[in-house]
Amino acid sequence: MCGRYSLIMTIGELQNRFEFDGERLGYAPAYNVAPTQNVLTVVGDEARRAGYMRWGLIPFWAKDKTIGSRMINARAETVAEKPSFRTALRRRRCLVLADGFYEWQRTGKNKRPMRIVMRSGEPFAFAGLWETWKDPEGTVIPSCTIITTTPNDLLKPIHDRMPVILSREVEDFWLDDSVDDPAALTSVLNPYPNDEMEVYEVSSLVNSVANKGPEVLAPVAENANG
């Protein structure tokens, strides 16, 4: 699964990388992004648009928004069939922007938080789906989910799932509104090449969503306990 990540690049760096207009976004670096928070996404094919969506997809037919907390991820293997996701796969796809994500590796009775980033240090895009939902007061809430797949060799010792990270070459295809073939779309939902990624252990401070500062992503020194 993908249940926590970071996005700390400057808005200028993100605009240059993902080619969107970042004015009036109210952007701020986020070191410990968690479900139900508002996350930065990009939609649109010919003209990309950036905006915030609630992390945890709320289907249009939902009676209340709490269902979104159970839909933070969609499995690549079943996303084309699941009623909650199949229409969004064909019609409402997005990029969820990040520059690192966290997974917890079990060692005995303990879990060690690990941060996974690109070796290049560049930001990247998770494959996302989005929906809009209207609450009883008439407020429209845009929400999204992050698609996951089987882990690559780097992630296998840590977790049995990993988020789908789209290569730069695939991003335009994913955002292309004219594409609605589920088979073609799911064909790009693959594990990202492990030789382009690296992983390191971080402080257990990241375990709590209340910790939102840069200290959560600082590497744990190998000799910290020695």
Image (tube, helix red, strand yellow):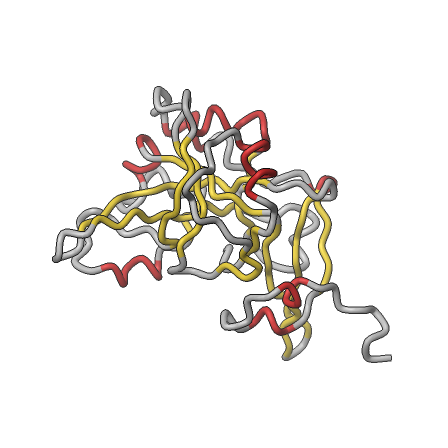
Q: Which residue corresponds to the image point at 75% horizontal and 68% vertical from the top-left?
A: 220
The image shows residue 205, relative to residue 176, as above or below, that is: below
189 sits left or right of 181 in the view: right
**Residue 192 x, y percent position in the rendering:** 62, 39
Work out whether residue 156 or residue 71 is closer to the camera in this orientation and state it: 71
- In the rendered image, which quarter is residue 107 located in? bottom right
Work out whether residue 179 or residue 5 is closer to the camera in this orientation and state it: 5
- In the rendered image, which quarter is residue 160 located in? bottom right
Q: Which residue corresponds to the image point at 35% horizontal and 61% vertical from the top-left?
A: 69
Q: Which residue corresponds to the image point at 87% horizontal and 79% vertical from the top-left?
A: 226
**Residue 36 x, y percent position in the rendering:** 38, 60
Work out whether residue 23 or residue 99 is closer to the camera in this orientation and state it: 23
Work out whether residue 28 or residue 55 is closer to the camera in this orientation and state it: 28
The image shows residue 87, relative to residue 181, as above or below, that is: below
**Residue 13 x, y percent position in the rendering:** 61, 38
The image shows residue 176, relative to residue 18, as above or below, that is: above
